[in-house]
Amino acid sequence: MKKKKTESKKDEDKFTQEMWIRLAVLIVAVILAYPIAMLLLLLVLVNIIITLIKKEPNKKLVKFSNAGLEEMFNVLRYLLFVSNKRPFKL
């Protein structure tokens, strides 16, 4: 009987720890959301200007922008419980 209670307690502790980590990720995401969104909008503007001048988008800028979007989506997936994979190492 004690073994089941011990395992249950460990599961509960792990669950609680995971919720604290999600809360920490949420706090960091809220703090960084506006600056990151502004950076991505700036990248859109820069890439539009480059595309108008060179008649093609800057591939490095597109790759960088895509990486930023992917990371944002990973954070959202984690916070919305779509994925249990943490968006960055904690």
Image: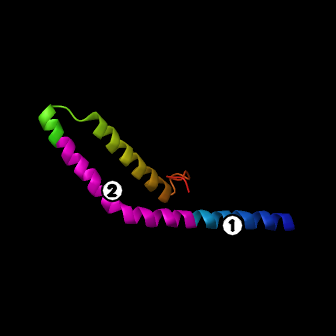
Q: CA distance from mark 2 to mark 1?
A: 35 Å
Circle 1 — which element? Answer: helix
Residue placed most toward the observer, 62 or 82: 62
Q: How is the image coloured?
A: rainbow
Rendering quarter of residue 56: top left
Q: Is residue 41 magenta?
A: yes
Residue holding disc 2: 36
Give how far across and how far down residue 76 sits, in percent. Answer: 43, 55
- Residue under numbered circle 1: 12
- Quarter of image, res 58: top left
Rendered view: 17 above or below 84: below
Amino acid, disc 1: Glu
**Residue 80 visible in the current orientation:** no
Q: Residue at x 74, y 68 (%)?
A: 9
Quadrant occupied by the C terminus: bottom right
Front in this rendered view, residue 74 or 52: 52
Residue at 31% x, 62% y is 34
Front of the two marks 2 and 1? 2
Q: How many numbered marks have been drawn onto this rendered protein structure?
A: 2
Q: Three-letter amino acid code at disc 2?
A: Ile
Query: Which contiguous range is marked in magenta?
Result: 20-48
Report whether residue 83 is seen: yes
x and y percent of residue 37 in the render? 30, 56
Mark 2: which secondary structure? helix
Q: Residue at x 52, y 57 (%)?
A: 81
Q: In the shown orientation, is residue 3 left or right of residue 43?
A: right
In the rendering, at what x and y percent does residue 80 appear? 47, 58
* 52 to the left or right of 14: left
Residue at horizontal 50 percent and vertical 66 percent from the top: 24
Main SS of the magenta part reads helix
Are discs 2 and 1 less than 8 Å apart at CB? no
